[in-house]
Amino acid sequence: MTPPTALDLPAVDPLPEATARYFDLCQKKLGLVPNVLRAYAHDIGKLDAFTAFFDQVMLAESARSKLEREMIAVVVSAENQCHYCLVAHGAALRSLSGRPDWAATLATNWRMAALSPREPAMLPFAVKVTRQSAEIGDLDRDALRDVGFADADIWDIAAVAGFFAMSNRLASATGMRPNPEYFAQAR
């Protein structure tokens, strides 16, 4: 098996029981253990923190649908040119949308994708969180409010974008490699 990163950091051996169960669950649900989890397995504390935050921003109850959250993940990952996240979350976006051509358009130039009336406000905000967060002001938040996003929605959009900005940088810095299975999923 190809190592999950360019770094030589072996997983804790044996994995703690809770981690082993989580990896088994991933294998059952996804048919694989994502390499990002394998990469973090050298430090269980960091793995637990990563998965807890991921689960909160991507899987927990939210007014933002899973599809919308994956859209943000892919657009942010495209801005950061994160190979790992574009491949992994591109697969999730294809699967959730059932539209591989649309998902590919979001990954390459989201401005060319057919979007709902609110998404042209959501995605530029996510990009600004990624590129220029210190420049975000009331006008940016008001643009989201003007199309019906509540303050809790703005928080969620920023949390997903911020999580992926961090995750993209770590994946790129460590040479994280996507699982080969992602490339063919939902095509």
Image (cartoon, rainbow, N blue to C red):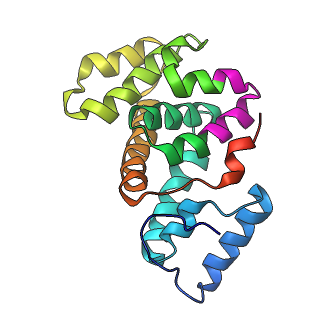
**Residue 23 on the magenta segment:** no
Which residue is nearer to you in this view: 139 or 152?
139
Magenta span: predominant SS is helix
Seen at 71% across and 63% down, the residue is: 26
Q: Quadrant of residue 95?
A: top right
Q: Quadrant of residue 91?
A: top right
Seen at 37% across and 28% down, the residue is: 127
Q: Residue 4, can we see it?
A: yes
Which residue is nearer to you in this view: 37 or 123?
37
Residue 106 position, x and y percent, is 56, 24
Q: Would you place residue 184 above or below residue 41 in this image? A: above
Number of marks in the rendered image: 0
Where are the magenta residues, as a range?
Answer: 90-102
Residue 65 position, x and y percent, is 62, 33
Indicate the quadrant containing the C terminus: top left, top right, bottom left or bottom right: top right
Which residue is nearer to you in this view: 83 or 154?
83
Seen at 65% across and 69% down, the residue is: 1
Q: Would you place residue 169 above or below residue 29 in this image? A: above
100 left or right, relative to 135? right
Q: Residue 60, can we see it?
A: no
Q: Would you place residue 44 above or below residue 106 in this image? A: below
Q: Would you place residue 130 above or below residue 29 in this image? A: above
Which residue is nearer to you in this view: 18 or 5?
5
Farthest residue, direction bottom? 14
Residue 107 position, x and y percent, is 54, 28
Residue 25 position, x and y percent, is 73, 67
**Residue 101 on the magenta segment:** yes
Q: Quadrant of residue 67?
A: top right
Seen at 80% across and 63% down, the residue is: 28
